[in-house]
Image (spheres, rainbow, N blue to C red):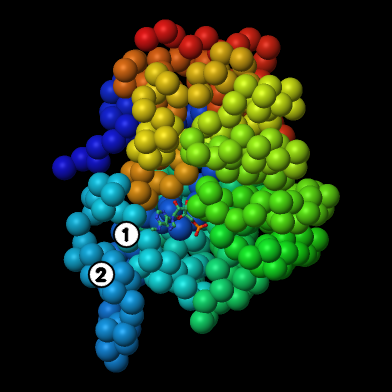
Amino acid sequence: MGITGFAADALRSLSTAQRSFIESLPKAELHAHLNGSIPIETLQELAKEYTIDSDDGMSSTLPPDIQTGLARLQSGPTLYDINSFFPLFPAIYFLTSTPRTLARATHAVLDSFLGPTPSPSESTGQLPPSSPQCTYLELRTTPRATTALTFASYLDVVLAEIELYPPEKAALIVSIDRRMTVDVVKEIVKLTIDLKEQGRRVVGVDLCGDPLAGNMHEFAPHFKRAKEAGLGITLHIAETVTNPASETLHFLSWSPDRLGHATFLNEDAKAIVMRDNICVEICLTSNLLCKTVSTLEEHHIRHYLRNNHTIAICTDDTLPFRNSLPGEYALLLATPPLGLGLSEAEVERVAKMGMSARFGCGSGPGPSDDAVTVPDT
Ligand code: 6MZ
């Protein structure tokens, strides 16, 4: 059985020539969460190895949600629908909570987006053959302290894998979860700035997590400090209909460089985003599957395309959403109602916009003055 879903269906609907066109386009993936992008095969391997390594019976003392998740991953059906996938996350986090397993997961994610590293590290074992999804990846992750990792060692492990690729291929964005305490936010921002000053491959800071959690006024000075240190700022903003407009305007006062989702911006917020040319990271499949947008027809991407505004097409979490960056581009090119029905020239311009919005490695060519026409469906 093949994988089904919006992006995969759109990709399948294209001709071989159209698929080759998408593959050959230089594309930047700017909104991909590490722990939401681990290939299922890697998780299954880690789950099976965990059982072998834990013959001492330790696994029976684990919390029930982790035990259930491990059992499901070990028994191995590879296709899950989205609602049965989310309960696996406690087990996924458990499986990536040591330096060795975090490195292995990060390596697999990088491979899946960029193809194998030029010189694979011995510690990560054999690399599966894979074709790259993108030209350049800004991978984001929330540092976690576990019994085997500190925030600093978590970031060091992830960066070490990213730095196996050249700077024009891969960089790190450090995610700040809205559920963190302000002391933890302060610590992580300081760590991130220190890493940048040491010349490590960290290019930005992200705000993510439960869209309604936390006191964002307390976080403001720390994001300001990150910006002043030369880090790019991207914020998950107006992700749900319940996010208050006042919060959205507050976030825009932080001078973010990019915005994640930006699904429910009101007219005032949209005017600021357009005026300040803030790139919007668009995750089509994610929005459709999470039901924050009902159809492609209604998706806010249309507003930005009509107004020739900078966007970056992104996957968000390839694991639960069963998508890929070429699949997301297929959604632009495919004939309605499967896709938006853009021309190849228009899709190429959208890809250039994404490349121009990178935090790392300078900026690429910006969009031209021609607006992308969105076919009426
Ligand atoms: C759904 C979850 C999740 O920053 O850790 N993620 N998605 N449900 C959950 N719990 C019930 N816990 C985590 O990656 C964070 C990504 O993992 C997913 C989120 O979609 C988030 O994008 P890092 O690398």
Circle 2: residue type: Thr
Residue 27 makes an appearance in the image:
no
Q: How far separated are the C-alphas under marks 2 and 1?
A: 9 Å
Task: Give the labeled residue for mark 1.
Answer: 87
Q: Residue furthest right?
A: 228
Q: Is residue 194 left or right of residue 243?
A: right
Query: What residue lies at 28% left-to-right and 23% top-to-bottom?
Result: 13
Side (left or right) of 152 relative to 25: right
Image height of 1 relative to 331, above or below = below
The quadrant of the rendering that contains the C terminus is top left
- Please indicate whether residue 55 sits to the left or right of residue 324 in the image: left
Answer yes or no: disc 2 within 8 Å of ligand 1. Answer: no
Locate ligand 1 by image quadrant: bottom left
Residue extending farthest bottom: 56
Query: Is residue 25 at all visible to an observer of this figure?
Result: yes
Question: Residue at coordinates 29% horizontally, 91% vertically from top-left?
Answer: 56
| Residue at image mark 2 | 68
Name the residue nearer the viewer: 148 or 329: 148
Is 305 in front, or is 221? 221
- Position above or below: 332 against 142: above
Q: Residue at x 31, y 22 (%)?
A: 338
Give the amino acid at mark 1. Pro
Q: Position of residue 17 (x, y in %)?
A: 36, 21
Measuring from the top left, give residue 33's x and y in whole percent: 50, 51
Q: Is mark 1 within 8 Å of ligand 1?
A: yes
- Label 2 secondary element: helix
Q: Vertically, is 221 above or below 180?
A: above
User: Is disc 1 surrounded by few (<14), some (14 to 19) or many (20+) residues within 10 Å?
Assistant: some
Secondary element under disc 1, as helix, strand or loop, is helix
The residue lying at 16 percent from left, 42 percent from top is 1
Report if the CB atoms under discs 2 and 1 are less than 8 Å apart: yes
